[in-house]
Amino acid sequence: METENGGFRFRRIPRQSSSSCDRMDPVLDETLEQWPHLNELVESYGADWVKDENKYGRYESVGPVSFNNQIFEGPDTDYEKEIELSNKGRVKAQGSVDELHESTSGSHFLESDFLAAPSSGNHIGESPLLAYEPVFDWFNERSTIFGQRIPANISFQYGSTLRIAIKVLKLSFQAGFVEPFHGSMCLYNRERREKLSEDFVFLMSPDVTQDSSSSAEPRGIFCVDVPSAAICLLIQLEKPAAEEGGVTSSVYSRKEPVNFSEREKQKLQIWSRVMPYRESFAWAIVPLFEGGSSSVCGVSSPPGSPIITSIAGSISQEVGNISLDGGHSSGNSVRVEISNLSKVKESYTEESLLDPKRKIHKPVKGTLVLEIEKLQTGAAEKCVEGGSINGGLTNLGRHSVEIDSQSSYMVELERNGSIAHRLTSTSPNDFQAFDFRITSRNEPFLQIFHCLYVYPLSVSLSKKRNLFIRVELREDDTDLRKPPLEVIHPREPGSTVKKWAHTQVAVGAKMSCFHDEIKVSLPTIWFPTHHLLFTFFHVDLQMKAEAPKPVILGYASLPLSTYVQSKSEISLPLMRELVPQYLHDSGKERVEYLEDGKSIFRLRLRLCSSLYPMSERIRDFFLEYDRHILRTSPPWGSELLEAINSLKNADSMSLLQFLHPILNMLLHLISNGGETLQVAAFRAMVNILTRVQHESMDDGERNLFLVNYIDFAFDNFGGRQQPVYPGLSTVWGSLARSKAKGYRVGPVYDDVLSMAWFFLELIVKSMTLEQTRLFYHSLPMGEDVPPMQLKEGVFRCITQLYDCLLTEVHERCKKGLGLAKHLNSSLAFFCYDLLSTVEPRQVFELVSLYLDKFSGVCQSALHDCKLTFLQILCDHDLFVEMPGRDPSDRNYISSILIQEIFLTWDHEDLSMRIKAARMLVVLLCKHEFDTRYQKPEDKLYIAQLYFPLLGQILDEMPVFYNLSTSEKREVLIAVLQVMRNLDDSSLIKAWQQSIARTRLFFKLLEECLIHFEHRKPDDGLLMGGSMRSPVGDKTFSSKYSDRLSPAINHYLSEAARQEVGPLGTPENGYLWQRVDSQLSSPSQPYSLREALAQAQSSRIGVSTQALRESLHPILRQKLELWEENLSAAVSLQVLEIIKKFSAAVASHTIATDYGKLDCITAVFMTFFSHNQPLIFWKAFFPVFNDILALHGATLMARENDRFLKHIAFHLLRLAAFRNENYRKRAVIGLQLLIRSSFSYFTQTARLWVLLTITLSELMSEVQVTHMKPDGSLEESGEAQRLRKSLEGIADEFQSTSMLKECGLPENALTSNGKKSPENCWSWSAVGLLSESLLLALDASLEHALLASVMMLDRYAAAESFYKLAMAFAPVPDLHIMWLLHLCDAHQEMQSWAEAAQCAVAVAGVVMQALVNRNDGVWNVDHVSALRKICPIVSNEITCESSIAEVEGYGASKLTVDSAVKYLQLASKLFAQAELHHFCASILELVIPMYKSRRAYGQLAKCHTMLTNIYESILEQESSPIPFVDATYYRVGFYGRKFGKLDKMEYVYREPRDVRLGDIMDKLSHIYDSRMDGTTLLVIPDSRQVNADELQPEVCHLQITAVDPVMEEEDLGSRRERIFSLSTGSIRARVFDRFLFDTPFTKTGKTQGGLEDQWKRRTVLQTEGSFPALVNRLRVTKSESLEFSPVENAIGMIETRTAALRNELEEPRSSEGDQLPRLQSLQRILQGSVAVQVNSGVLSVCTAFLSGEPATRLRSQELQQLIAALLEFMAVCKRAIRVHFRLIGEEDQEFHTQLVNGFQSLTAELSHYIPAILSEL
C-alpha cells in the first residue's frame, strides 16, 4: 500500500482559520469537561480532516497520446505531398504550426510522435490500445460503474460558490474631499429584502493617497451561490455628524458646481477630529448581475447567453463605466465607477430604499470607485496544498495537504466556511464577510461559529434628539460597576474586540432610525443572566470649549435566553435609570420607564451558531449524552434512550446542520454502550441517515453530506475513541441474522440495506484508522503498513453479515428490486476497501462466498450484479499485484475475472456482452496508462495474467463470432494488446498445440484487420471487389459503429476543449465583450462543445455518415485522425506478430501447415485487401523481404497460386497510385517476387503468366481513361503511373537507390542465401517480362480509348480485340477469351472468313497444349497443317506458358473436345465465307480424333461433309464467271486527326459485293465523327501522294481498289491483269501481296492518247496474309513499276491473245461443256475482230505504226509490236475456225460477221504491216 505519505494511508488536512473567522469563534473561557457534548462539537469542528488516500484509488497516467496525420492514399490522391506543402506554407506564414493546431491530447497535429516514426524497442508500431483509447480517463471510465463512488463529480444544488473580492479604490466629490468617510457594504437580495452577508466596513480618509491598488488595502470577500439579478451590493456611507450651524452635508448634493473654501475646509477638518460620532450620509445599490445568467466577475456563461458590458446592466444605467483592469494577479478584475450615490435626507430603513413609491433621494455629486475581482477557483487549493502540520498521533499526515478543487468536500468546505475563505485572497488584511445563508441551508456545519448580530432599528421619542445607542453584553445584572464582556466586534477596520459598540447618530429626529450591524461573540454556554444592554445617548452637535459630551437618556435590556432564537422584530421599553437586578421581577418593580413604558425601541437579532441547536430535541439529546458520559444519570439510562428515540422527531434542518457531532456521539454509544444502548443508537442512526438521504436536496445514491462525513470528518481522534467496527459489525450482524432467521425486525431493516454503503465504508475506515494507529510508531519511514489480520471473532461476524447481505442481493435481484444493485455495489466496494486494509486472503474468502452465490450464467439482473462486482474489485490499485508476484501466489481475482468475462460473452443478454467486453478494455487501458507499469517486465507480467483469455477464445471461437461488431472490436483490441506485450516464448506456446488452433489464432488477426480498416469516403479503387459500393454498404464499415463508442465519445469530448475563437480568449473560452449572436447559430457553432452536443443529441437513428456530416469540421478532422491512427496501429501490430511467427516457422518449433504456410498467406492477403497507410507500407516490405527469404520456396509454390495472384494484383494496384512512395514500394514488391521466382525456379514463366493474369484483372477495375473537356477520351494518370512502374521493374540503374530508400539491403535482388548470386537475377529476363506487361497494358489502354467509337468503327474494334489477344498470349485462357471476343465481333460484321480464322486460332491454342501433353490425338504435323490455314498458329510449342497453372487459369481446361468444337465452328464459318478448300483441311484434322475414339458415326458424317465440300469446290471451278471470295482496297490516311493512323496505309478485305463507292461512304462516315470540325476529303484517284504537300488542317483518305497477287504470278509482265487468266484450278486464296495499276502521262494528265499513255503498277506487301484475324492489314512494303505507251500497247495485244489461246486450249471433260465454251469464245472474238472496235488493234497501229510515232520507236520495240500483232491475228484466225465447228444453224449469221470483220481488219492492218497478208 505504498503511498506518497511514507507508508501511511491518511492525510491530515488542517482546518485553518483566518482573522475574520476568529471573530466567529465562541468565548471558550469555561472548562468544557462538564459539557461532553461541547467537547464533541468543538472536536468535530476543530479537528483536522482525515482523508483516506486509497479509498477512491490513486492513478497516475502517462502522458496522453499524440496523433500524427496518417497517409491513406487512393489512386488519384497524394495527401503526403499536400501535407508537406501545407506545412511549409504555414511555417512561412506563422513561423510555427503549433499555436493554432493542437490535437486533443495537447500535442500538435503535425508535429506529434504517434506512429510518426518507427517505434523504439522491439515493436514495429505503437500500441493499438493507446490508439483505441487516445484520451483514456480513468475517472471518467470508473464513473460509469453502477454505484461508483465519485465524490469529485457530485455538486450541490446551488452549484459551485462564486467568490467576489471588492476593494474601495477612490472616493471623490464635486465640492472636494476634506473630511473622512466611513462606509459599509454587504450583499443584499432586492426581491426578498434580505441581507445575505455581514457588513464589510471601510474608511476613506482625505489624508491617505487614493486610487491605490496595493495588496495591503483590505478587501471584502463575498460569496455568491447563484448569480441573480436580485443580488446587489448595498453600499452605505457615513460622515462625522454635522456641526449645528456649520458646513452641512447638503453641500455635497448641490446642483451647481461648488468647491469648499479654505475656511470651510479647516472648519470641517477640525470638527471631524473632535466629533467621534457619525451620521448617515449616502447610499447606493449596485446590481452585480444581469438576467441572472452571467457575472461581472468573469463567471463563465453558457454559449449563447449574454455577457454584460456594465456591472449594472439594464437595472441601473447610472452605475458608470467598466474597464478591464489587471490590478490583481488573477486578471479577472474590473474597475467600477459608482456615480449614483443618493443623499440621505432623513433617517431610513432598508425597506425604504426599495420602496418604488417613495420619492427618490437627492443625488450626491460624487463618485465611488471600486475594484471587483473574481477570485480564482484553485486559489484555495494551492494555499491548502502548501500547508503541512507536524505532530504526534493526532497529526498522522506529516505530509503536504492536497485538496481537489473540484471534489465535493472542497465545495462543501468552501460553502460552509470550514476552510477559511481568506485562503483565496492574496492579502492577510482581506475581510471575509460571513455568509448568513450558511445558517439557513440544509447542510452540515463544518466549523465553529457562535455569534449574534444585533440590528437596532428605531427609537420613537416625543422630542427631537441627536440620538445614538451603545450596545454591550453583560454576564449578570447584580453589579452595575462590573465591566461588560469584551465580545463586541468593532466597526473600525483593524481594531480588536471591545466591551461595547456605538451606532450612528440620528440627527434631530423624533423617530430615530438606524442601520448599524453590531456583531457579538457569544459564550459557549449562556445562562439566564446573560443579556444585552442598550444605552441611549443624546449628543449636542455644537463646537464649544471642549468636545461635545453625550447625555444618557435611558436604557434597555434583552436577556439572551429569552430572545436569542427570535427571528422577528423585538420591541423593548426604555428604562430611565438602571437599578440592580433589573432583569428580575423584583428589580423591574423599581424601574422607571420613558414614554409611559411604551415599547419604543425596535430591533432585530440574528443568531449564527454551530454550537447551539435550534431544535429542543437535539438540545435534550446533548444534555442526556452529557449525563450519560459524566455518569450522572441512572445506570439504566432510560432518559438517554428516550432522547435518542426522540431524535427522529427533530426538525430536518437542525438535524442536518448538527449531523457530524450527532453521528460521532451515536457511534461513541454504539462502540461503548451496552447492547440495548447499541441497538437504540444504531436504529436512531439509521433513521437519521435515511432522513438525511431523502431530505437534503441531494439525489445521489451516496448522499454527499454522508460521504463527506465518512471521508473527512470521521476519525478516532488519535485513538482517544475506541474503534467502532467491532460494535457496528456486531449490532448490524445480529439484526441481519434475526432477519435471516425469519424474525420480525421492522421497516428499519430496509433502511439499513439502503444505507448499507455508509455503514460498510464506516467499518472499513474504522479498521484502517485502527491499523494506522497500531503501526504508526513502529513503522520505519517510507515502508508500507502491513495488512491487518482481523481477529477470528470479528472476521466471523463480518463474514456472517456479508453472507446475509449477499442473500438479500440475490433474492431482491430475482424480484427486480432496484435496491439490490445498490447493495451489490456497496458489497463490492466493501471488498475493494478491505483489500487495502486486511489480509488479502481473508478478502478472497468473501469474494469466493460471493461467486458461490452467483455461479455460472445467471439471470440478467444477477449477472449484471456479478459483472459490476468484478468491475469494482478489479479497479483496485493493487489488482495486478494481489496477493503478490511470486509464482506461487496465484492471482485469484484475475483468474475469476477472465472466467466470468468469457462466460458473459456467451450470455443471451446482449447488454451483458457489451459490458464484459468494455470491462476488459478499460482494465487493460488502466494498466497500459499506469505510470507504475511502464517497464517491459511489468507489461509482460500483466499480459501473462490475461493470456489465458486468448486460449479460451481459441477454444470456443463460436462465442467470439456470436458477438456484435462493436463487441468484437473491444475484444480484438484487448487481445492485440496482450499479444503485443507477451514475450516470444509465450506466443510460441500458443502456436505449439495444434495446426487448427494456430489457424484460429491468425483468424483473429484477420478479424483485427477487417474490423479496424480505415477507408476515406472518397476511396474509389477496388479493394477486393466490393469497395466501389457506398460507404455504408459494407458489412464492416470503416466507421466504427453507427453509434459512437465510449472511446470516441471521450475523444471528441477532449477534442471539444479546443475552442474556436480569436487568440487571447480567456481560459474559460469567453471574452468580456458581448459576443455577436451570429456566432452561435446552428450553421456556425461558437464552440466545439456546441457542435459535439449537436451531433450527439441527433445521433440516434441516423447513419454514421450523416452523423459525421453533422459534426463540426474540426471535430470531423479529429475523428478522422483518430480512426487513421487506430487502423495504422492495428495493422502494424499484426505485422509484428507475423514477423515473429515467420521466425518461429523457420525454426520448425510450432504446429502449422508447413506445406502452404496458410497462416502467413491469409493475413498477407488481408493486408493487401484493405486500405493501409503509408507508414504501414514502409514497415511492410522489409518484413516481406525477410519472409520471402525464409519461406520463398513454399510461398512461391503452385499450392499458393491464389496467394501469389492476390499479392501480385495488389502490388500492381499500388503501382498505379499517385503517391510516389506507394509506387516505389510496389515496384520493390514486384521485384522481390521476381527474385524469389529466379531463386527457387531459375525462371519466371509461371510468374510471367501470373502477372499477366493479374494485370488483366486489374485493367477491368482501374480507370485507365478519363474524359477530356471536349468529350473525347485520353489516357488517365493511373495508366501513365502504372506504365512508369512497369518500366521501373527493369530499371537496373534506379534499383539500388530504391532498395535503400525502402529499407532493404542493396543486394536484396541479386543475392539469396540459398543460391549463388549468378543464378538469382537476370536483368534481361526481367526486361522481357516488363515489355510483355507493358504490351498488355498498351493493348488494354487502346481498347479502353475506343470505347466511345467501338460500335461505329468496327475495324478499330477488331484490331483492338486482336491486340489484346496477342498481348495476353502467354495466358491461354486470356488469349482464347479475346480471340472469341474478336470472333463474335467479326460475326456481327458478317466477316465470316475472319471469324473462322479466330476459331482456327483458338483451336490452334488448344491443339498446341494437347500436343505438348502428348495426348496421342494430334502431333506437330497437324499443328503445321493448321498453320497453313491460320499463320498465327505458332509452330513453337511453348512448354512454359502452356503448362503454367494458376488458380482459375491454365492448360488443364484445354481439352480435345474443346479443340474439336472450335474446329467445327471454323469449318462452319469458312463455309459461310464459301472458302470450301479451308473447310476440307479442317475436317481432315477432325477425322483423326474420331478415329482414335472409334466414333464411326461421326466419321461417316465427316466424310459426307467432305463430299459436299469437294462438290462445292468443283462447282466454283466450273463456273464460267470466275469465283471471287472478297474485294480488296488500299486505304491511305493523311492528317493529324487520324492519330496513330496518320501517314499509314492499310489493305482492307471486304465482302465481294462491296464496291469502291460503298467503302468510300463507309470510311467517310466512320471518320467524319472524329474530325471535330476538321474537313475530311477523299482523294479521287490512286496517284502517289506526298503528305507534306497536303493541307495540314485538312484530313485526307485515299481509297484504291487492289487485286490480290498469286505466289507464282510475274508482276513484271506488261500484260493487262485479268484475274480469271491468272488463277489456277485449285486456289489457296491466301494473299499477302496486292497490286493496282495507275495510268499517267508525262505531261501530268491522267489520261492521254495511246502514244502518250504510261502506266504505273504498285505492289503492296502486308504484315500478314488474308484472310486474317482482322479485316485490315497494315502495308509494310510498297514497290512500283512503270510501263511506256508502246509497252502498254504490246501488253494489251498480248493479253487478248492469251485470253483467246487460253479459251482454245482449256480441256473440256464432256460434250456437255461445249456450250459454256462457245459463249466464252464468242464474247472474246466479238471484242477482238469486230470492225466497229476502233480502239482495239487498229488504233494501236494507227498510233504507233503511222508516221512520226513509228520513227520514235526503237527497233526492238517495233519488232515486238509487229510480232504481237501477227500472233494476235493468227490466234484470231484459229479461233474463228474453232467457232465454225462449234456453232449451229442459229449462229451462222454471227459467224459470217466475224469472218467479214477479220478480213476487214486484215486489210486495214496490211497498210501498216504488209507482211501480214503473207503470214495469214
Image (cartoon, rainbow, N blue to C red):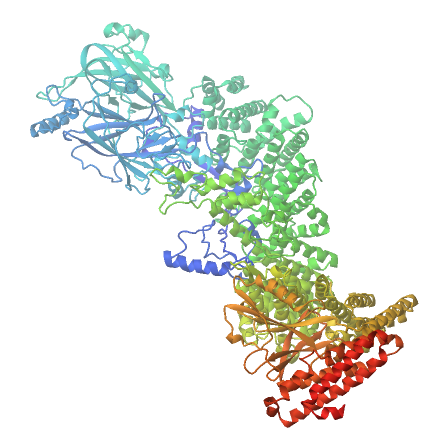
Q: Please indicate whether residue 1141 sits to the left or right of residue 931 in the image.
A: right
Q: Nearer the viewer, residue 920 or 321?
A: 321
**Residue 1609 location, x and y as percent?**
72, 83
Query: Does residue 713 lie above or below 1472 as drawn?
Result: above
Quarter-wise, where is residue 1473 in the image? bottom right
Can residue 1156 be seen here? The reply is no
Total label count?
0
**Residue 1513 location, x and y as percent?**
82, 72
**Residue 474 location, x and y as percent?**
29, 19
Where does the C terminus fall, quadrant-wise?
bottom right
Q: Nearer the viewer, residue 1096 or 1576?
A: 1576
Q: Please indicate whether residue 264 sits to the left or right of residue 321 in the image.
A: left
Q: Please indicate whether residue 119 sits to the left or right of residue 1615 in the image.
A: left
**Residue 948 location, x and y as percent?**
67, 51
Q: Nearer the viewer, residue 1528 or 1415?
A: 1528
Quarter-wise, where is residue 869 in the image? top right
* Residue found at x 74% / y 88%: 1767
**Which residue in the rendered view is the most extreme toward the bottom?**
1755
